[in-house]
Amino acid sequence: MIQVKVFDCEHEKDLEHDLNHFLKGLDERKIVDIKYHIAAIPEDSDEQIYCFSGMVIYRK
């Protein structure tokens, strides 16, 4: 059975940590694909909010 695990973080390093922690417990042969996405959301001020997300597609 194919499953997914989705991660969503405000900082790139947090996403990297969470993904690596999850992947550490997963057999490499079960990984189908890993997707990565960044979204930048403009704020009213001069700042932007970033959203870093990743999705691991794997076999259960």
Image: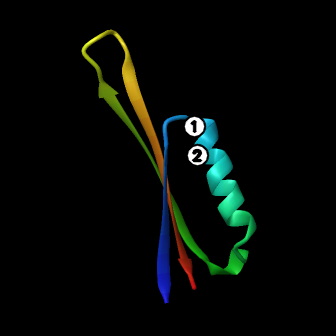
Amino acid type at circle 1 is Glu
Quarter of the image with the C terminus is bottom right
Left or right, residue 40 beside residue 32: left
Q: Which mark is residue 50?
A: none
Would you place residue 17 above or below residue 44 in this image? Answer: below
Q: Residues within 10 Å of mark 1 (few under 14, many from 20)?
A: some
Residue 23 pos. (x, y %): 68, 64
- In this rendering, position of residue 22 left or right of residue 7: right
| Vertical position of residue 10 compared to residue 58: above or below | above
CA neighbours of label 2 inside 10 A, class few (<14), some (14 to 19), many (20+): some
Q: In the depicted view, which residue is nearer to us: 45 or 16?
A: 45
x and y, in percent, of residue 42 in the image: 29, 23
Q: Which residue is mark 2?
A: 15
Structural distance between the alpha carbons of marks 1 and 2: 5 Å
Coordinates of residue 34 in the picture (x, y in percent)? 54, 62
Say which residue appears at 70% left-offset and 58% top-offset: 21
Q: Is residue 24 left or right of residue 16?
A: right
Coloration mode? rainbow
In this figure, what is the number of numbered marks?
Answer: 2
Query: Looking at the picture, does residue 32 appear above or below residue 36?
Result: below
Q: Residue at x 55, y 34 (%)?
A: 11
Q: Quick one: SS at disc 1? A: helix
Instruction: Say which element carries label 2.
Output: helix
Q: Are marks 1 and 2 in contact (CB under 8 Å)?
A: yes
The quadrant in which residue 41 appears is top left
User: At which x and y percent is residue 46?
Assistant: 33, 9
Using residue 27 as the reference point, say whether residue 5 is left or right of it: left
The residue tagged 1 is 12
Instruction: Specify the farthest residue to the left.
Output: 44
Disc 2 residue type (three-letter): Leu
Residue ID at (72%, 77%): 27
